[in-house]
Image: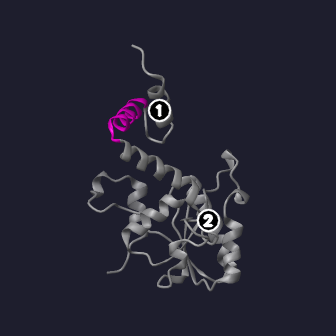
Amino acid sequence: MQIAEPLIVAIEELSKLPGIGKKTAQRLALHILKSDKESVDSFVKAIEELKTKLRFCICCYNLSVEDLCEICKNQKRDKSIICIVEDVNDVLAIEKTNEYNGLYHVLGGVLSPLSGIGADSLKIKELIKRFETEEIREIILALNPDTEGEATTLYLAKLVKPFGVKVSRIARGLPIGGDIEFADEATIGRAVIGRIEL
């Protein structure tokens, strides 16, 4: 069966998005084709503005429309605490909880020597500069508990210790609603070590 070239191109482009296979890309392309012109124009405009209007905050490297992001500009945030994360997705996830009221620092990745990502590839120098200009009393390391995340956590903890700030990490353990009997040993071990007093 012959397929019109614009549809083939749209499917190819949509399938380049993470988590989108050829079948999902085809469904999305057909949905866009069936949509009214105003909806499609609005969609195209949103994507264009995503690329043209967003930039990285000059302080924390979160996404922003201006030089400083909304979090860094917010006077109600606790400016003495910085949560260090791998990327913007982590900021979004933590912000959804409404449990954290400090600032962030987005590294832009984690140490991964096998992939050629060293300290110079990340926003670590920029983090250290913040200690010179801001009154920081605590950093929270909120990196993924995989090999690269653990290595980056240990590296950063050692790097910032001389500044005399409290260094903590987010707790790890059992998810809400999870059963202990079905959790792996490492997760149960982390939950026991990270226990809190009631």
Q: Toward which corner of the image does residue 25 lie, by quadrant?
A: top left
Mark 2, Cα crowd under 10 Å, few <14 / some 14-19 / many 20+, is few
Residue 77: percent from the left, percent from the top?
48, 82
The structure's colour scheme is one colour
Kind of residue indicated by mark 1: Ala
Q: Toward which corner of the image does residue 7 lie, by quadrant?
A: top left
- At mark 2, the secondary structure is helix
Residue shown at 50%/29% (left/top)?
Answer: 9
Q: Nearer the viewer, mark 2 or mark 1?
A: 1
Q: Toward which corner of the image does residue 118 lie, by quadrant?
A: bottom right
| Residue 34: in magenta span | yes
| Residue 120: in magenta span | no
| Mark closer to the chain start, 2 or 1 | 1
Residue 136: percent from the left, percent from the top?
60, 83
Residue position marked by numbered label 1 in the rendering: 10
Residue position marked by numbered label 2 in the rendering: 154
Q: Name the residue nearer the viewer: 69 or 34.
A: 34
Question: Which span of residues is magenta-colored?
Answer: 22-36
Question: Magenta span: helix, strand or loop, mainly?
Answer: helix
